[in-house]
Amino acid sequence: MSDLKGFLLTEGESSNKLPSQSGLALSVRNQLTNLSISGFSTSKKEDFSSEVAKIATSEEVLNELSDSIGKPGDNESEEQFVERAKSTLANILRRKLKS
């Protein structure tokens, strides 16, 4: 694939690929649901997690993420690239949730 968005929108055919768009949503939702958020019932945490997952997999966010991270650098390991992508996604989500 030429960019991250194209890759995420295509269901992976092998187990060594990044999660598809639905897999990304599930991962975001699970991570947020497992957080200890005081004052939130389980139901509210699940609702919040689902909404953040929708934002994370929206076309707008996927475009911004893909444009921001580009391709892996020449000396960047897969692990470093994934960490950079996760950090960038977290920053995008923080900004979106503040507005």
Image (cartoon, rainbow, N blue to C red):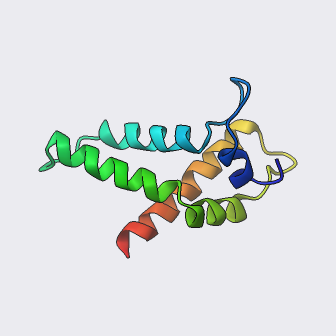
Residue at the top extreme of this rendering: 15
Q: Quadrant of the C terminus?
A: bottom left
Total of numbered circles in the picture?
A: 0
Q: Residue at 77% of width from left, 54% of height from top?
A: 3
Residue at the right extreme of this rendering: 74
> Left or right: where does residue 68 sit relative to residue 40?
right
Q: Residue at 73% of width from left, 46% of height from top?
A: 7
Where does the image place residue 66, in percent across and percent down from the top left?
69, 59
Q: Residue at 50% of width from left, 55% of height from top?
A: 56
Where does the image place residue 74, in percent across and percent down from the top left?
87, 48
Q: Relative to 38, is 90 above or below?
A: below
> Left or right: where does residue 42 sit relative to residue 90?
left
Determine the image quadrant of residue 76.
top right
Of residues 8 and 30, the one nearer the viewer is: 8
Of residues 67 and 26, the one nearer the viewer is: 26
> Left or right: where does residue 50 sit relative to residue 42?
right
Q: Relative to 89, is 34 above or below?
A: above
Where does the image place residue 1, in percent across and percent down from the top left?
82, 47
